[in-house]
Amino acid sequence: MAQDHDWDAMYSAEEPPPWDLGEVQPALLAFLDRAEIADPVLDAGCGTGTLALLLAGRGHSVTGFDLSAPAVDRARARAAAEGLDAELQVADAAHVADLGIRPRTVLDSGLLHSLDADAQAAYVAGLAAICPPGALVAVLAISLEADQGWGETETTLRARFGDPDWVSTAVEDIEVHARWRGEELRMPGFLLTTHRS
């Protein structure tokens, strides 16, 4: 079960949300360094743009979206300040099919596990609708074992990205980093990778 957050308030607060590290999650960064990332790339739940701007800086064509307007405003300001070209939009994951993009790579750094069950189902169905055959999807998620009262299991992740829409699905145990009140947190998580059939 996902947490119930006021995302705008969290992104507008003086202290960044725990997941807004100012750097890409280490497990996802390691994946990017070994994976073949095909354009266009969709950064699902882009927050303040850290992942989208890293990819743009590497020369990728990137669209990022987030439900929080304050987060997207910050992402756009960062892109302008760094002279990077990324399409950054305010959008709802449950309506991802409305973005007008056919991504060959989708990167989700903590979005899926923040959604309720209905939104998760709509989001994954939307990804199946917009991803062309062979498109890569990578999802970083907190494990239920992190004891946050919410999260994913390998079973739930595999069930969402199963036949007939997805193939070559793999789930890797990873460590998810967070920061809260100056304390560095390390929690168990997963990195799922799959391809559109």
Image (cartoon, grey):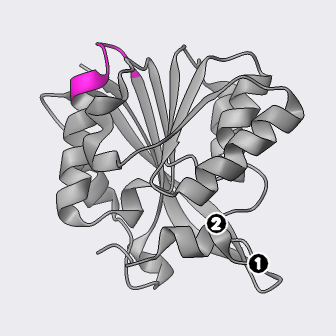
Q: Quadrant of residue 120?
A: bottom left
- Reading the image, the residue beneath label 2 is 19
Q: Determine whether 188 is above or below 46 in the image.
A: below
* Helix, strand or loop for disc 1: loop
Horizontal side, residue 31 vs residue 168: left or right: right
- Reading the image, the residue beneath label 1 is 14
What kind of residue is marked 1? Glu
Q: Nearer the viewer, residue 61 or 187?
A: 61
First to last magenta residue range = 129-135
Q: CA distance from mark 1 to mark 2?
A: 14 Å
* Helix, strand or loop for disc 2: loop
Q: How many marks?
A: 2
Residue at the image point whose x is 64% and y is 66% from the top:
19
Viewer can see residue 33: no
Residue at the image point whose x is 71% and y is 51% from the top:
74
Horizontal side, residue 186 vs residue 95: left or right: right
Q: Determine whether 62 is above or below 17 in the image.
A: above
Queried whether the magenta region covers residue 187, the answer comes back as no
